[in-house]
Amino acid sequence: MTPFNFNMLMFMAMLVAPMALATQHVVGDNDGWSNPRYPEFYAEWASLHTFNVGDTLFFNFTKEAHDVAEVPQEAYDQCHTKGAKVIIKSAGAVKLTSCGAHHYISTRKGDCETHQKVALYVQPSSV
């Protein structure tokens, strides 16, 4: 029988804990990533959640109906899509790897202008 190794147990707990505490947030919840019902929809959605480094954002939408690009605040505010790098072209997830403000828009014609965009603040990991 192998002796109990406390150090190995602690090491394994440290590896698993951040994964167990990470949250997957479905952007827009049941509405998903689409043209919002009203202009403040995604701002309200973000205000109801706490985002931490290590969490993921899941953007749920039909392929080719929308997309997702992370952009600087100025591009977000003015819906500038020129030069925006699309990071998701069909339903998928983005891992939040850094603290601070993050801004996401759909670059499809008219989407951002109809407020299909979300800004959120990511906090340090709670672990």
Image: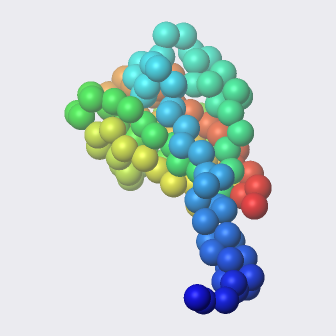
Q: Residue at x 75, y 61 (%)?
A: 127
The percent coordinates of residue 61 (x first, y second) are 33, 30
Q: Residue at x 68, y 77 (%)?
A: 9
The vertical placement of 47 against 50, above or below, is: above
Q: Nearer the viewer, residue 63 or 127?
A: 127
- Give the side of residue 105 with respect to residue 61, left or right: right
The vertical placement of 56 against 50, above or below, is: below
Quadrant of residue 47 within the rendered picture = top right
Could you tell me if residue 78 is visible in this image?
no
The percent coordinates of residue 85 (x first, y second) are 38, 52
The vertical placement of 74 against 127, above or below, is: above
Q: Residue at x 66, y 21 (%)?
A: 44
Total marks in image: 0
Way the structure is coloured: rainbow
Which residue is the extreme one toward the left?
A: 64
Quadrant of residue 10 within the rendered picture = bottom right
Which residue is the extreme one toward the bottom?
A: 2
The vertical placement of 61 against 81, above or below, is: above
Q: Residue at x 58, y 88 (%)?
A: 1
Quadrant of residue 98 within the rendered picture = bottom right
Which residue is the extreme one toward the front?
A: 1
- Give the side of residue 17 with respect to residue 36, left or right: right
Could you tell me if residue 34 is visible in this image?
yes
- Give the side of residue 24 with respect to residue 12, left or right: left
The percent coordinates of residue 102 (x first, y second) are 61, 47
